[in-house]
Amino acid sequence: MKIKSIIIIAFIAFVGSGCKESFLDINTNPNTLPTASPNYVFTNALNTSAANMVSPNETGSYWAGQWSQSNGYILSTTIFSYNFTNADFNYWDGYYDNLQDYQFVIENADTYSQKYLKGPAKIMKALLFQQLVDMYGNVPYSDALQGSKVLAPKFDDQKAVYETLIALLDDGIKDVKANPFASAFASSDIVFKGNTTKWAKFANSLKLRILIHQAKIAGRDSYITTEINKIVSEGSGFITGEDVGVGGSGFFLATAGKLNPVYDRWGYDANGAKRALNNYPRLTQYFVNSLKAGGDTLRLKRIGYANGGESSATPGVSSAKEIAANYAGVPFGQSSGFLPSACSSLGPSLLVKGEYNRPYLIMTAAEVQLLLAEAKQRFSGVTLTGTAQSYFEEGIAQSFRAFGANVSAAAAFKGSKVNNYDWEASTDKLAAIATQKWIALANFNGLEAWTEYRRTNLPTTPQTVQVVDSKRPLRFYYPNTESGSNSANVTAQGTIDALSTRLFWDVD
């Protein structure tokens, strides 16, 4: 695929060499680009991954029924009327460019005596390919990332890619366990600061996500059970008690182009001026009313600001009194009657004025606990030590923590008799898990929320008011850039209808 990102980084490294004597060495071939050090490429790749995920997470947040838009803008027909083509939602090019950077690290880490970067690069490669499959289905994998050697890569079957990612993550875990970070290079890891134990936990958590995505496919129980038990036997465990984020304090800066990408898009600029797009995303009416119905007001106040948004005088606090009556959502796809000041904007779990240096979250511990709950509930043969109930309740607690709510308050749902909150009172345990996962993913990972919605059909969110039938987006079209440069292989995928062509894990 493309090698643009490597060339740019190499050029920056070249220019940044300054006026050293070696710059004038007459034996240097002026027609050969210098090679970037893998640690610099890796840091940039992580930052690029965070930036690239913002837009698909936004789209997913809409189609998962969590966000809508205020009526301060003309309604987006691509989002809310599903009027989109292969000219829309091109996340493909950015992801493959980013993947090429991770591939560069994998292929060059040994040469530069930076073996500790290989495992994390493989894990991030697996994450990006998982998301590509979840957006597009069949994708180039075995022929991909070879630069000019393969200009028209064939597409691999999506199920086969998923299985290959499990093996890639296994390799990544072996690499991180065998190659501790050199302390001088820990800062190049803007996710875990060189903590290879946490990278292994993240890899196992990502494997669990990939496996549970396939949980409703007939005939996959034995495979999924076996692979989960392998994770348990490996021994590193899963992400617990903290979330996986890129950047954060010390990396994102109060400088144009260096802010947390979410803060920069929907929050404020480097000088603290509110972005115009701050008036765009709003919580859906269904989401707000669902949280109110469950008595889940603590998380509601963290997921959204009360009507009127964030106080200009007190960052992180709503301008209106934070009582349930002051939180209002927008019916999904509603084109009038909900101006920005009259509905709930994205809340302090995501945006607080002045907090430009939060990490960009790519996986939460709450999601992992709820994946474990589903694994235990569905598959009797897994050797996980907890119960489905204990994982479910811990998932809610971790969600409270991630949103910035009082964790101890989560315990109030035990024995509350509230369906989908109180495990014992919930009539459908899998529906309860899906509902809590939908809440926990809000604001942080809209793409995964949309994937879970497509996979489980839960919760039963309302259809957009712009569409009269029941059809909803099931995937994206292959972008026209790929159709233009790799037309034969795109055509070989058959006729794609984004409203009816299901991905392999979307069985109903």
Image (cartoon, rainbow, N blue to C red):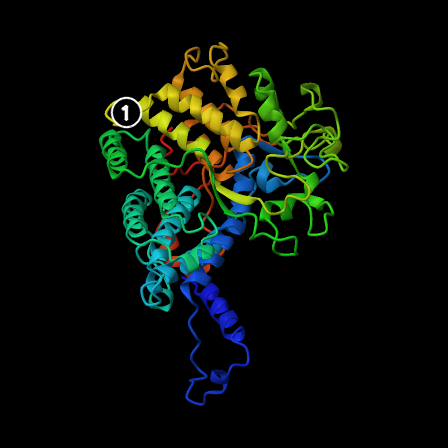
Towards the viewer: 181 or 10: 181
The type of residue carrying mark 1 is Phe
Residue 146, x across and y down, in percent: 35, 63
Residue 140, x across and y down, in percent: 35, 54
Residue 257 appearing in the image: yes
Residue 368, x across and y down, in percent: 40, 33
In this rendering, is residue 319 above or below 155? above
Left or right of 405, for residue 111: left
Residue displayed at 43% across by 55% down: 186
Kind of element beneath mark 1 = loop
Residue displayed at 35% across by 62% down: 109
Determine the image quadrant of residue 179: bottom left
Residue at the front extreme? Answer: 183
Label 1, residues with CA under 10 Å away: few <14, some 14-19, many ≥20: some
Residue picked out by circle 1:
379
Left or right of 232, for residue 20: right
In this rendering, is residue 9 above or below 340? below
The N terminus lies in quadrant: bottom left
Total numbered labels: 1
In this rendering, is residue 1 above or below 326? below
The C terminus lies in quadrant: top left
Residue 267, x across and y down, in percent: 67, 43
Left or right of 41, for residue 145: left
Towards the viewer: 223 or 179: 179
Determine the image quadrant of residue 97: bottom left
In this rendering, is residue 442 above or below 249? above
Residue 483 appearing in the image: no
Towards the viewer: 86 or 368: 368
Residue at the bottom extreme? Answer: 26
